Image (tube, helix red, strand yellow):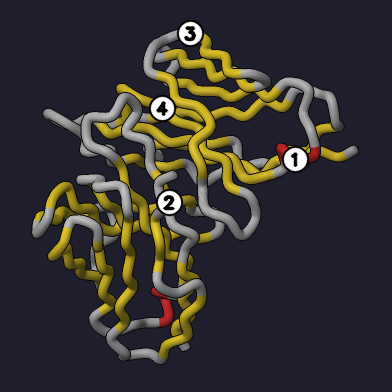
């Protein structure tokens, strides 16, 4: 099993809809989870982090973490064409002591929001 | 704003050449990373460093080495470039012990090995 696996997509939603991006992870990954957004030809940028079970909301973005099911998701409400990008799910590996910020990434999901 | 600068945006090299990719960050971060990004595979960690002269292998270190002589600079070296090392290389840095250990990425170097 891959350490972090995303529904590969691509995902296409109409403007104003809710985009749902999903990610599962293996036992080798835990603690902290992150969603990065990467526009075409650009580098990834952090948009959400989540550490405990439940939901975390930031504007139009909601991250959800379910440790029992080993499942992380990102919901984008009122999707806009400017949200069109690749979304990368990442987690820290289980390790004794500090992870030093080492992340393991999923393969990414391409989201297109069409007008 | 944190700035992570990679020396080249595009590089074309020949098989067997020694290749140096340079990365400099200006925020005094302890942690620095080299990832490569390939379609369908996401980002894979090559090497990371958590202090000057300290380095650890990531998931795919074969064919690569690194150097960190100064805190702000982290170099990736391809000892003898091969065609399967054609990829986008991303450097990143982070502040150790920060709340989310947020990674700041450089703009990337697209390396083509012919």
Q: Which mark is drawn over residue A82?
A: 1
**Residue that appears at 42% across and 81% down:** B83
Using the image as rendered, state which of residue A43 and residue A71 is in the foreground.
A43
- Chain bearing mark 3: A
**3 and 4 marks on the same chain:** yes
Query: Separation of disc 1 and disc 2 at Cα?
Result: 20 Å
Q: Nearer the viewer, mark 2 or mark 3?
A: 2
Q: Earlier in the sequence, mark 3 or mark 1?
A: 3
Quadrant in the picture for residue B63: bottom left
Determine if residue B26 is in view: yes
Q: Earlier in the sequence, mark 3 or mark 4?
A: 4
**Residue bearing mark 2:** B105
Query: Separation of disc 3 and disc 1 at Cα?
Result: 27 Å
Q: Secondary structure at mark 3?
A: strand
The image shows residue B28, relative to residue A27, as above or below, that is: below
Query: Separation of disc 2 and disc 4 at Cα?
Result: 17 Å
Query: Separation of disc 4 and disc 1 at Cα?
Result: 23 Å
Q: Earlier in the sequence, mark 4 or mark 1?
A: 4
- Chain bearing mark 4: A
Determine if residue A10 is in view: no
**Residue bearing mark 4:** A33
**Residue that appears at 79% across and 33% down:** A80
The image shows residue B82, relative to residue B34, as above or below, that is: below
Query: Separation of disc 3 and disc 4 at Cα?
Result: 12 Å
């Amino acid at each position: 099993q891959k350490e972090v696996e995303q529904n590969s997509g691509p995902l296409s939603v109409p403007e104003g809809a809710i985009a749902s991006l999903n990610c599962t992870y293996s036992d080798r990954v835990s603690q902290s989870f992150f969603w990065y957004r990467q526009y075409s030809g650009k580098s990834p940028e952090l948009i959400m982090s989540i550490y405990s079970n439940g939901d975390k909301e930031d504007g139009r973005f909601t991250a959800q973490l379910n440790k029992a099911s080993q499942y992380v998701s990102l919901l984008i409400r009122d999707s806009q064409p400017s949200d069109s990008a690749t979304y990368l799910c990442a987690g820290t590996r289980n390790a004794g002591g500090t992870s030093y910020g080492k992340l393991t990434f999923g393969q990414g999901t391409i989201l297109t929001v069409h007008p | 704003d944190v700035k992570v600068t990679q020396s080249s945006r595009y590089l074309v090299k020949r098989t067997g050449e020694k290749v140096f990719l340079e990365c400099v960050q200006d925020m005094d971060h302890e942690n620095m990373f080299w990832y490569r990004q390939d379609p369908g595979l996401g980002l894979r960690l090559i090497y990371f460093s958590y202090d000057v002269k300290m380095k650890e292998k990531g998931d795919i270190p074969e064919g690569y080495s690194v150097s960190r002589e100064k805190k702000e600079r982290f170099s990736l070296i391809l000892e003898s470039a091969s065609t399967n090392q054609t990829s986008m290389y991303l450097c990143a840095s982070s502040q150790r012990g920060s709340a989310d250990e947020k990674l700041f990425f450089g703009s990337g170097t697209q390396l083509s090995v012919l």
